[in-house]
Image (cartoon, grey):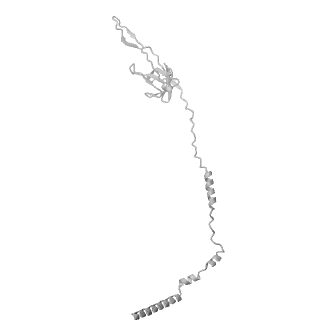
Amino acid sequence: MVRILQILSVGAILAAGGILALAVSLWRQEDPRREEICHRPSAVELFQRSGGRAGEPVQERPPLIVQAEAFALYLDPPKTPAKPVAPVRTAGPRPALPPVRPAAPSVNFRLRGTSYYPNQPRKSMALVAEVGAAEGNERWVREGERLGHFVIQEIRCGSITYRDGANLREMSVEHRSSPPSLVRDLRPGSRQVSAAVEIRSTEAAGDGEEPTAQ
């Protein structure tokens, strides 16, 4: 047992000596990288070559100045650019109406009467009878309504103006004799036909304004 320990001790000593010899041989061997590092200029030489100028430090703004500028912007914010305002278009002068002409001979209706509201022209109406229509088939029309290709332009007291294409014409109420009634006198021995006049009345609604009937 003692011999084994002696042998191991001697082997360890020999191994240590071999490792030491290998390290010495490697240390003495020339390394190209070491030569390159040794031939590099030092930091002092680099500083001298640069003329004694080190890297310029970055100029940092003091925090107090930055906070002061932010507070100034809060108190007096920059003005936003004003939005362009679209020009207001003013209503131009109304186009001149063409001269009023008398009713055309080819008009297909007749004016029987008008219900005229001076203060509310839109409520005015005209009683017209179309040519060829049966008696009692008259109808009321307002401004803007069509009668065939004619357009009612304006209703006045006792007359109307209407458009016939590009022309503006006028028609007055047609005064006619009272039509005879078809009711016969049933008295014995009498064949005379009596005449009856039909009275039409128009009630006006709204604002207590009384229409002017013609």
Q: Is residue 194 left or right of residue 31?
A: left
Residue 135 in which image quadrant? top left
Q: Most extreme residue toward the bottom, as rendered?
A: 3
* In the foreground, 31 or 82: 31
* In the foreground, 74 or 50: 74
| Number of dots carrying numbers | 0
Residue shown at 53% from the left, 84% from the top: 32
Residue 2 in which image quadrant? bottom left
Q: Most extreme residue toward the right, as rendered?
A: 51
Q: Position of residue 206 (x, y in %)?
A: 48, 24
Q: Position of residue 131 (x, y in %)?
A: 41, 22
Q: Name above or below for residue 114 compared with residue 48.
A: above
Rendered-image quadrant of the N terminus? bottom left
Q: Can I make out residue 9 in this image?
A: yes
Q: Most extreme residue toward the left, as rendered?
A: 188
Residue shown at 62% from the left, 51% from the top: 75
* In the foreground, 26 or 204: 26
Q: Position of residue 197 (x, y in %)?
A: 42, 13
Q: Can I make out residue 76 in this image?
A: no
Q: Name above or below for residue 5 compared with residue 39.
A: below
Q: Position of residue 185 (x, y in %)?
A: 36, 8
Q: Most extreme residue toward the front, as rendered?
A: 2
Residue shown at 44% from the left, 92% from the top: 9
